[in-house]
């Protein structure tokens, strides 16, 4: 009952509202309310205008400071860049000499690439052999049990020299997880676009 009474106090009674409308309106009270509202609005507007002008002045000062600092940074950067460019001709001669001495005939480059691939493959094989479990050592393929690994030449040709290969590139690939790092990956495009 206490809550019901409180709820009734909060909800305006329609009969009371109708009675207030029937009462005569005091013009003097209405005018005073209007004048007080105008005075309050004027006071608020003055305070807002003062604060806005202070804010505008501080923003103007900040922008002036930013532009002068930016100008100083640009001048320093161009001076440093000019200094670096002036030192460049002396180092270019040695770089050009080294570049001109690089062997670029096709056979030598192919041999170098093939040697790099073999070295990496051998390193991977050694790493896998070190990490192999004892159960992995046992031969699980009965068809190959009679083959001796030490006999014969079982070296396969590189898939990078296949006629079905259209393009091969090394790219940086990000892992599937959100915070994973970038890793180098070999991407190969075949003639059938896979």
Image (tube, grey):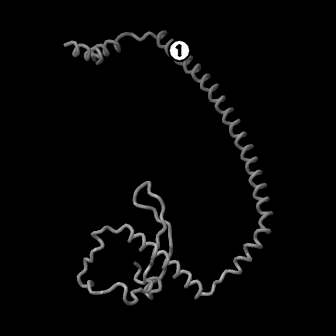
State the residue position of label 1: 36
- Work out whether residue 106 or residue 141 is closer to the camera in this orientation and state it: 141
Relative placement, left or right, of 99 versus 79 is left
Q: Residue at x 75, y 71 (%)?
A: 92
How far from the left and from the top, in percent, is residue 101?
A: 70, 81
Residue 130 locus on image (x, y percent): 39, 68
Of 68 and 52, nearer the camera is 68
Q: 186 left or right of 6? A: right
Q: Nearer the viewer, residue 31 or 106?
A: 106
Q: In the image, is residue 191 above or below residue 11?
A: below
At label 1, counting other C-alpha atoms closer than 10 Å, the crowd grade (few under 14, some 14-19, many 20 or more) is: few
Rendered residue at 27%/69% (across/down):
135
Please tell me which residue is depicted at 50% across the width and 72% down the height of the picture. 170
Residue 77 at x, y percent in the picture: 74, 53
Image quadrant of residue 3?
top left
Whether residue 43 sits left or right of residue 71 in the image: it is: left
Q: Residue at x 71, y 35 (%)?
A: 61
In which quadrant is the N terminus drawn? top left
- Secondary structure at numbered mark 1: helix
The C terminus - image quarter: bottom left
Residue 31 placed where, x, y %? 50, 13
């Amino acid at each position: 009952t206490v809550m019901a009474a409180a709820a009734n106090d909060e909800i305006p009674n329609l009969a009371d509202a109708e009675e207030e409308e029937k009462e005569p309106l005091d013009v003097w009270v209405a005018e005073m309310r209007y004048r007080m509202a105008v005075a309050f609005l004027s006071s608020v507007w003055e305070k807002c205008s003062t604060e806005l002008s202070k804010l505008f002045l501080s923003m103007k000062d900040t922008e002036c400071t930013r532009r002068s600092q930016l100008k100083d940074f640009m001048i320093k950067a161009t001076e440093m860049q000019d200094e670096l460019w002036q030192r460049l001709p002396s180092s270019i001669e040695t770089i050009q000499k080294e570049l001109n001495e690089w062997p670029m005939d096709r056979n030598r480059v192919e041999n170098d690439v093939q040697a790099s691939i073999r070295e990496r493959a051998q390193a991977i094989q050694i790493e896998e052999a070190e990490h192999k479990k004892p159960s992995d050592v046992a031969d699980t393929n009965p068809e190959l049990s009679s083959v001796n690994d030490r006999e014969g030449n079982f070296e396969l040709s590189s898939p990078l020299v296949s006629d079905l290969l259209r393009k091969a590139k090394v790219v940086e690939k990000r892992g599937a997880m959100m915070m994973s790092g970038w890793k180098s990956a070999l991407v190969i495009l075949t003639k059938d676009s896979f």
